[in-house]
């Protein structure tokens, strides 16, 4: 099957995105989008870009570009930021809801980026983002490090080609592994917090222990989940391992 994927470089034109020390997010996003898109094209993917130059389109217009292209996936590339410089670090991928093939692809992208040494902040639900809720195909928004973190910027620049390849690899793995046919419904919850820092700490600890942990933001709470399973017994097996390791858990859908 030939896949068509929309690659969106976040922001653009008059919309700078986040800025730090003269560096504008819109520029990093475009450079990354073109690099990821080229790798996908080299692997036989039909790539549609929302922009290839410094122009502005509203998020709704970008979502409509994806819908009109009749694409299989919509992937928006961004850099993250917090109000205080050098207080946030790492990568995360946002989805409308953490289910189905978009969740599998998000986890694959995060895993490949984390393998480069980035902190993995998880897969996070953001149902109010226009490019995630107005697209008719599975959609993801990748935050490739923090633009107002000096270490993340140094890594982004020094390992740019590896970062682009990691994102592309996460996408291609999802297509090649047959995950398009899966709809995971069972997840193991290990914690719920009112701030993302506490959730990130637990998620990082679980990932270090070898668990496929990620974060879901729902109704103001940051929930730490492990795995997404179509088979209930697989979720039970993971829950038993977590409990043996001292974690408090329950299975959710």
Image: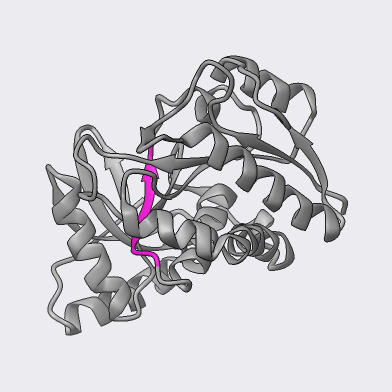
Picture colour scheme: one colour
Image location (x, y in percent) of residue 154: 42, 59
Mark yes or no: residue 140 visible.
no
Residue 7 belongs to the span the image colors magenta: no
Instruction: Give above or below for 62 relative to 201.
Output: above
Residue lying at 12% horizontally and 79% vertically, measured from the top left: 246
Image location (x, y in percent) of residue 176: 73, 66
Q: Is residue 12 left or right of residue 129?
A: right
Instruction: Give above or below for 54 relative to 161.
Output: above
Residue 123 belongs to the span the image colors magenta: yes
Residue lying at 13% horizontally and 68% vertically, measured from the top left: 248
Magenta-tinted stretch: 118-125
Image location (x, y in percent) of residue 9: 61, 35
Q: Nearer the viewer, residue 49 or 192?
A: 49
Residue lying at 39% horizontally and 31% vertically, measured from the top left: 18
Image location (x, y in percent) of residue 11: 53, 26
Q: Is residue 36 left or right of residue 77?
A: right
Residue lying at 47% horizontally and 73% vertically, measured from the top left: 115
Find residue 245 and report its image quarter.
bottom left
Residue projecting furthest to the front: 22
Please name the predominant secondary structure of the magenta segment in the image.
Answer: strand
The quarter in which the N terminus is drawn is: bottom right
Mark yes or no: residue 67 visible.
yes
Q: Is residue 204 left or right of residue 9?
A: left
Find residue 63 and report its image quarter.
top right
Q: Nearer the viewer, residue 26 or 104?
A: 26
């Amino acid at each position: 099957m030939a896949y068509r994927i929309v690659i969106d470089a976040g922001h653009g034109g008059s919309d700078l995105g986040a800025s730090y020390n003269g560096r504008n997010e819109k520029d990093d996003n475009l450079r990354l989008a073109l690099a990821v898109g080229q790798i996908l094209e080299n692997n036989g993917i039909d790539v549609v870009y929302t922009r290839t130059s410094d122009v502005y389109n509203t998020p709704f217009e970008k979502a409509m570009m994806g819908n009109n292209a009749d694409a299989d996936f919509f992937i928006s590339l961004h850099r993250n930021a917090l109000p205080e410089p050098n207080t946030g670090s790492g990568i995360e991928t946002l989805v409308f809801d953490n289910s189905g093939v978009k969740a599998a692809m998000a986890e694959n992208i995060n895993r490949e980026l984390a393998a480069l040494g980035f902190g993995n902040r998880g897969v996070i639900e953001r149902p109010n983002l226009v490019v995630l809720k107005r697209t008719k195909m599975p959609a993801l928004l990748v935050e490739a490090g923090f633009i107002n973190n000096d270490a993340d910027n140094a890594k982004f620049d020094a390992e740019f080609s590896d970062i682009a390849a990691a994102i592309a690899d996460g996408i291609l793995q999802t297509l090649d592994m047959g995950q398009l046919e899966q709809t995971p419904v069972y997840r193991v919850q290990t914690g719920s917090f009112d701030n993302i820092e506490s959730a990130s700490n637990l998620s990082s600890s679980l990932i270090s222990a070898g668990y496929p942990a990620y974060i879901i933001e729902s109704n103001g709470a940051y929930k730490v989940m492990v795995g997404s399973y179509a088979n209930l017994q697989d979720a039970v097996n993971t829950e038993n391992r977590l409990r043996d390791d001292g974690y408090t858990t329950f299975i959710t859908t």
